[in-house]
Amino acid sequence: MAYIGTSPTAGQYRKLDSISSSFNGSTTTFTMQVGGQNVSAGTPAQLLISLGGVIQQPTTDYTVSTSSLTFVTAPASGLSFFAILMGDALSVGTPSDGTVSTAKLASGLTVDLTSGSVGAPSLTFDANTGLYSPAEDEIGFVEGGVEAARIDSSGRLLVGTTTSPSSSVSGAQLSNPITEACKFSSGSTTSAVNQIAFINGNGTVGTISTSGSSTAYNTSSDYRLKENVVVLDGAIDRLKLLPIHRFNFIADPDTVVDGFIAHEAAEVVPECVTGTKDELDEDGNPVYQGIDQSKLVPLLTAALKEAIKEIEALKVRLDAANL
């Protein structure tokens, strides 16, 4: 049972040993016992006391401190005494705002809420912002009276939509990557849209955008972001230094692919590789290098242009020689 205040003690209701033989009109404090053994009361309200057939009022007529019972007025000699030690009386009331800490809540506390609705969330932060349950095993996040996001019964996080994004439904979806870990849709529009933007302290440094029929993976390239621009020359000589291999990944031994070794490529085009050769983390585990092969395109293009220039020059010489 959840409670606020002193933990209740149930099932005591024990008769205290009589202390009437000690009444003398001057002594006010007595020891409470049951069967000759000291007992304690948590609060005065835990005792039902009668003196001379008159019920005494807790706190007003007597107080308690562990096993000590103190009367405000000393009982007169010969006065009868009868007392029952009960379970704690629960102080029922409304605590002030902000006064109940987590330490005062019983472990395993559960709270049952109604399902609510978009217009009236069951758990609110203000009048029209909060949480509700649109269906069994689903949670809706409401902001300003509009459902902004939902976790559906399949565990998918839907943002800006209440159903999976599609060619007609705009929004975003994150889910268990069994088939599609992420889905982003601009709905029925076919105009250019940035589906994802990558931003750091310098601003937007890349986007993934879609148009009517294609997807573009964009990195920042505006001339206004660059300086010291010169022609790339000597590309063929650099390209010849770039080893190209066929190999398979250890995790996929049956698939042979063409490609590069990261640290070898870094010696020719450093910007195409991330990470450091043979790097380990603090636990001694490998931190593997990666490669962005698109960063090789400028070198390949420059080398091709140099090759075309040489081919054209050779062709002129051949034509002049009537060969």
Image: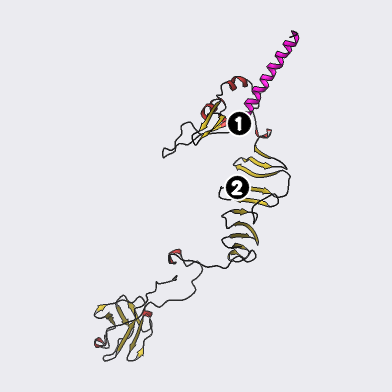
In this figure, what is the number of numbered marks? 2
Q: Position of residue 45 (x, y in %)?
A: 38, 80
Q: Is residue 175 left or right of residue 100?
A: right
Which is nearer the eye, 265 or 51?
265
Q: Looking at the image, is 85 positioned above or below residue 275? A: below
Q: Is residue 128 left or right of residue 24?
A: right
Q: Does residue 230 appear in the picture of this structure?
A: no
Helix, strand or loop at mark 2:
strand
Magenta highlight range:
294-323
Residue 314 within the magenta-colored segment of the rendering: yes
Q: Amino acid at mark 2?
A: Cys
Q: Position of residue 293 (x, y in %)?
A: 59, 31
Helix, strand or loop at mark 1:
helix
Residue 204 found in image quarter = top right
Residue 234 within the magenta-colored segment of the rendering: no
Q: Amino acid at mark 1?
A: Lys
Q: Magenta stretch mostly in which secondary structure?
A: helix
Q: Is residue 308 left or right of residue 58?
A: right
Q: Looking at the image, is 211 positioned above or below residue 241? A: below
Which quadrant would the C terminus be assigned to in this image?
top right
Which residue is depicted at the point 56% across and 31% down? 257
User: Residue 295, which numbered label?
Assistant: 1
Q: Position of residue 140 (x, y in %)?
A: 60, 60
Residue 68 found in image quarter = bottom left
Q: Residues within 10 Å of mark 2 (few under 14, many from 20)?
A: some
- The mark closer to the camera, 1 or 2, is 2
Q: Looking at the image, is 185 positioned above or below residue 123? A: above
Q: Looking at the image, is 152 positioned above or below residue 191? A: below
In 3D space, how far apart are the residues under numbered discs 1 and 2 (Cα atoms)?
26 Å
